[in-house]
Image: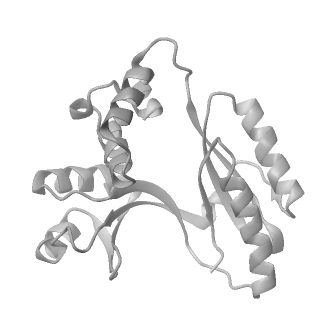
Amino acid sequence: IAIAVKHGGPLPENNPKLRMCIQNAKGVNMPKDRIDAAIRRASSKDEKDFQEVIYEGYGPHGIPIVVECATDNPTRTVANIRLHFSKNGGAMGNSGSVVFMFDRQGVFKFDPNAANLRDYELDLIDAGAEDIDWGDEEISVYTKFSEFGHMLKFLESKGLEPKSSSLQYIPATTKELPEEQQDEVLKLVEVLEGDDDVQNVYHNLA
């Protein structure tokens, strides 16, 4: 929310990124007063200036990992991320070293009970849906990075509210590992996700 407000102002109607953040906050049951407080705080001159940073590296057994961070101190963050990799059998790489193995895609997730998306299937494809996963627990709509804003506008125009919408790094291919090796990779992922500056961790472990 802080990053969205700094980039595009505190008014959701003029700031699509902020609208998306508010939607995602509601999706995880964040109370409205906390959302409003976060917007007010981010609008004040005293609020720290956060920036989004991407770090890349390899986990155990050559698994590529992309780490999305939001930080007010990149020097601290990069040191912590490097330490997490080296202490858990991985190695941090240079910018561009693994990100080419992932596609940046828009991902919109819906509660199957709350959204009658079947009625809009063709419209969703026209609006840029590359793939729709009709799960029992959750419906996921995937778009190209370039179509993300277009899909956001389409959903708003139809009053279709996803429980979350985000840009994610989806692996082009996945890699199978024996269970013991999987556990080593997932331990690193868990440590990275536990870092306060880390927003998301992506990998290609099947």
Indicate whether 205 appears above or below 192: below
Where the N terminus falls, by quadrant? top left
How is colour applied across the structure in the image?
one colour
Q: Quadrant of the C terminus?
A: bottom right
- What residue do we see at 31% from left, 48% from top? 23
Q: How many labels does the image show?
A: 0
Relative height, residue 71 to residue 170 (above, below): above
For residue 138, side relative to residue 172 (left or right): left
Identify which residue is drawn at 79% across, 42% down.
80
Which quadrant of the structure image shows residue 133? bottom left
Estimate the x, y position of residue 155 in percent, counting from the top left.
Answer: 19, 56
The residue under the point 15% across, 72% down is 116
Left or right? Give the position of 32 relative to 199: left
The answer to whether residue 135 is above or below residue 166 is below
Q: Is residue 172 visible?
A: yes
Instruction: Say above or below: 2 vs 63.
Output: above
Where does residue 147 sit, x and y in percent of width and height?
A: 31, 56
Q: Extreme bottom residue here?
A: 178
Please report the residue visible at 64 percent of the width from the left and 41 percent of the height from the top: 197
Quarter location, residue 105:
bottom left
Expressed as whole percent of the image width and height from the top left, the position of residue 68 reads 60, 49
User: Where, by quadrant of the figure, is residue 32 drawn?
Assistant: top left
Q: Is residue 63 visible to the viewer in this orientation of the structure?
A: no
Asked whether, in this view, residue 33 is left or right of residue 45, the answer is: left
**Horizontal relation, residue 138 to residue 185: left or right:** left
Camera-nearest residue between 59 and 150: 59
Where in the figure is residue 169, as x and y percent of width and height? 53, 60
